[in-house]
């Protein structure tokens, strides 16, 4: 099985040993005749000259396996006719759970209310978790993992997805109840993908539904939130906060107003990384499925965009 590693060169040293260990039967290459490849392992940033990869010469490729959970940078490529699979990695899910849980706990406990300035602020005791309402927007693999973990800690958790598909022990609102899901959220966790339907989903009107003092944690995609609207709502809701890990432009420009806003925390897209040690096994499984003409795992729906 001949596989092209269609990813930035900086990833090669970490990924090549992991992929070869997980799938010893592959001939993993960094270049070659496109028609000779049975599959591609893809990550954004390839080709490194900034051009769009032309998939049309890869006439014998049976699958394009993304190393990222998000596929918005490739799914609209008009030359991509091969099956595309997104990465659903247990290590990535665990990383997202840890990130969202950590920041949700910080917001819940009001850790930023206690500057070490010699002032004794007794009386600002947080409620117990059962009395704190959390909404998770996006109930895919990552959203379900985050919602279940927070529910297990005792929080009052509601999920929202377009379909409203049931999740064990979590109340899930469907598409038409988005406003209800937002208006109850003392902590709003955003884990939706970037699609035509989700861009600017959190506009000024919807952000204005948040309760006083709400915290927004966006670890999904930067396009979900209207940035100007968020800044306006933070100014109108002076105890609200935002923890933002994803942005429309990355790296976030040094002059962006998020950097200097007193109630915005910027993290540099670190919520969940695809880890070669765990993700290589998922990629290997899909490569074998492709070569055996078996159903692929996490096949992308081109119309839905994920």
Image (cartoon, helix red, strand yellow):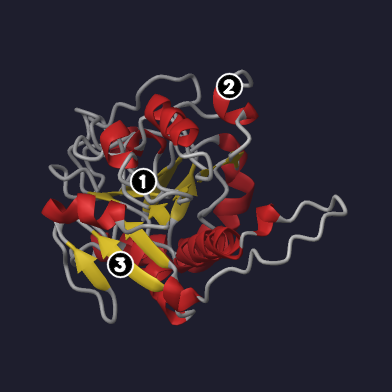
| Helix, strand or loop status at disc 1 | loop
Q: Residue at x 42, y 58 (%)?
A: 186
Q: Earlier in the sequence, mark 3 or mark 1?
A: 1
Q: Which residue is mark 2?
A: 253
Of tags 3 and 2, the one toward the viewer is 3
**Image quadrant occupied by the N terminus:** bottom left
Q: Which residue is mark 1?
A: 70
Q: Position of residue 185 (x, y in %)?
A: 36, 57
For this view, does 220 lie left or right of residue 160? right
Q: Position of residue 2 (x, y in %)?
A: 38, 50
For this view, does 186 lie left or right of residue 168? right
Q: Which residue is mark 3?
A: 158
Contact (CB < 8 A) between labels 3 and 1?
no
Q: Earlier in the sequence, mark 3 or mark 2?
A: 3
Where is 92 relative to 267, above or below? below
| Helix, strand or loop status at disc 3 | strand
């Amino acid at each position: 099985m001949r596989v092209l590693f269609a990813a930035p060169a900086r990833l090669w040293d970490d990924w090549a040993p992991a992929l070869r260990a997980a799938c010893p039967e592959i001939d993993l290459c960094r270049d070659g005749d496109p028609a000779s490849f049975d599959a591609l392992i893809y990550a954004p940033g390839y080709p490194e000259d900034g051009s769009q990869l032309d998939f049309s010469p890869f006439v014998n490729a049976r699958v394009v396996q993304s190393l990222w959970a998000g596929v918005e940078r490739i799914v609209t490529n008009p030359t991509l006719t091969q099956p595309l699979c997104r990465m659903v990695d247990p290590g990535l899910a665990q990383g997202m759970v840890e990130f969202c849980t950590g920041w949700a706990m910080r917001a819940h406990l009001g850790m930023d209310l206690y500057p070490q300035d010699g002032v004794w602020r007794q009386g600002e005791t947080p409620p117990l978790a059962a009395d704190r309402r959390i909404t998770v927007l996006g109930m895919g693999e990552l959203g379900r993992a985050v919602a279940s973990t927070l529910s297990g800690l005792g929080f009052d958790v509601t999920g929202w997805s377009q379909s409203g598909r049931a999740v064990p022990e979590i109340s899930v609102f469907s598409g038409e109840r988005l406003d209800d899901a937002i208006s109850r959220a003392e902590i709003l966790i955003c884990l939706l993908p970037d699609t035509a339907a989700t861009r600017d989903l959190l506009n000024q009107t919807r952000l204005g539904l948040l309760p006083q003092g709400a915290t927004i944690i966006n670890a999904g995609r930067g396009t979900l939130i209207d940035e100007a609207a968020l800044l306006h709502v933070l100014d109108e809701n002076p105890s609200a906060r935002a923890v933002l890990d994803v942005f429309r432009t990355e790296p976030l420009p040094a002059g962006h107003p998020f950097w200097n806003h007193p109630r915005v925390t910027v993290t540099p897209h670190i919520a969940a990384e695809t880890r070669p040690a765990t993700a290589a096994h998922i990629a290997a499984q899909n490569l074998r499925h492709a070569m055996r003409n078996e159903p692929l795992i996490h096949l992308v729906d081109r119309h839905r965009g994920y």
